[in-house]
Amino acid sequence: MNTNTNINMDTPTSINKNISFTNDICADGICCFMSIPRKQNHLGVWKAFLKRGNASYGVKLLYTSLRDKDIIYNPCRCLEFYLKEVSAPNGSNLHVLIRCGIFGKKCRPYMCGSFPDKIDSFMYDIPAPCAYNEYLASSAYVTLKHKHLFRIFFAIKDDRKLLGKIFPGYTANETKEKLNQYTDVVKVGAVWNGKPAEYFLLEAPKTDTALYISDAHPKIEGVQQAYNQWQGHVESWLEKHYSSKWQDHLDRAIEEENNNPKRRK
């Protein structure tokens, strides 16, 4: 995991339209959706420091594909979520910038630094790669295991209070208008946690800085390496898709990978 968010937020975000963001997308917040402490107790941090971040007002992480039911991840309650407009060759697009509401721009909080390997993290109980780790893996690995590609989105609730907090320098109405203008932002209606609402979907970036590198949850370099790391998990998925022929599909994928190293990238 990249430990330096490099976000310059020395002045209040609600009034500073010229706020200076990093040029790179800070993706530390991926773990703040997928590997937060159980009961969000933050390993003993005093409750006085548990500032409620703006993401808690309605930002979610959505894992979706054509063949699987949507999976929703709620954010850490301390997570701050911001949008920034960035110039592009064909106009402009939106970047997502994320930071911890307790520790700000300086670093990833030390009590979260060992997640998802920390015993208090729900990922500790799962002998499998996290969804974002697989999101960054090669198509050869993803299509072998899942038989399809999947996508991950930030889902931003169409809520006046939330929209007024996430785009520095813009009102809730202006933020909503901008989100409606972007072709890479899709609006959907959904019922999550039993509550119907409309959400703006912005696809999560594929950036290696979002990976927390560890022995238990390393970056996926290829089919063979992933199988060695999570053998039982991968086998169960392959049996689900290929029945008794799962070993043939696995061997073929590894052989193709060995003959063509570029397939690993």
Image (cartoon, rainbow, N blue to C red):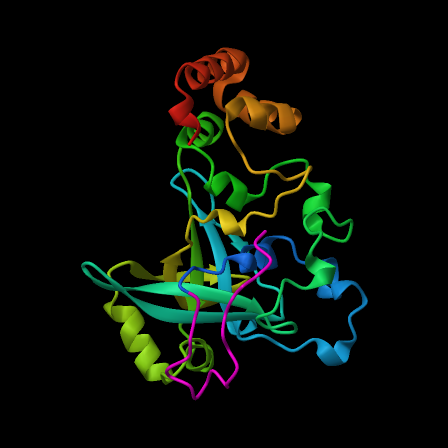
**Quarter assignment of residue 14:** bottom left
Rendered location of residue 103, percent (x, y): 65, 72
Rendered location of residue 116, percent (x, y): 68, 49
Residue nearest the observer in this picture, 15 or 191: 15
Left or right placement of residue 61 versus residue 121 in this view: left
Q: How many marks?
A: 0
Where's the C terminus, which quadrant? top left
Residue nearest the observer in this picture, 113 or 248: 113
Residue nearest the observer in this picture, 217 or 151: 217
Asked if the magenta segment contains residue 33, the reply would be no
Rendered location of residue 93, percent (x, y): 29, 63
Left or right placement of residue 98 versus residue 127 in this view: left
Q: Is residue 154 above or below residue 141?
A: below
Residue at screen point 28% across, 76% down = 177
Q: Is residue 126 above or below residue 10?
A: above
**Quarter assignment of residue 200:** bottom left
Residue nearest the observer in this picture, 131 or 23: 23
Rendered location of residue 130, percent (x, y): 58, 43
Looking at the image, the residue that sits furthest to the right is: 44
Q: Main secondary structure of the magenta part?
A: loop
Left or right placement of residue 88 versus residue 64 in this view: left
**Quarter assignment of residue 2:** bottom right
In the image, the segment drawn in magenta is: 1-22
Looking at the image, the residue that sits furthest to the left is: 90
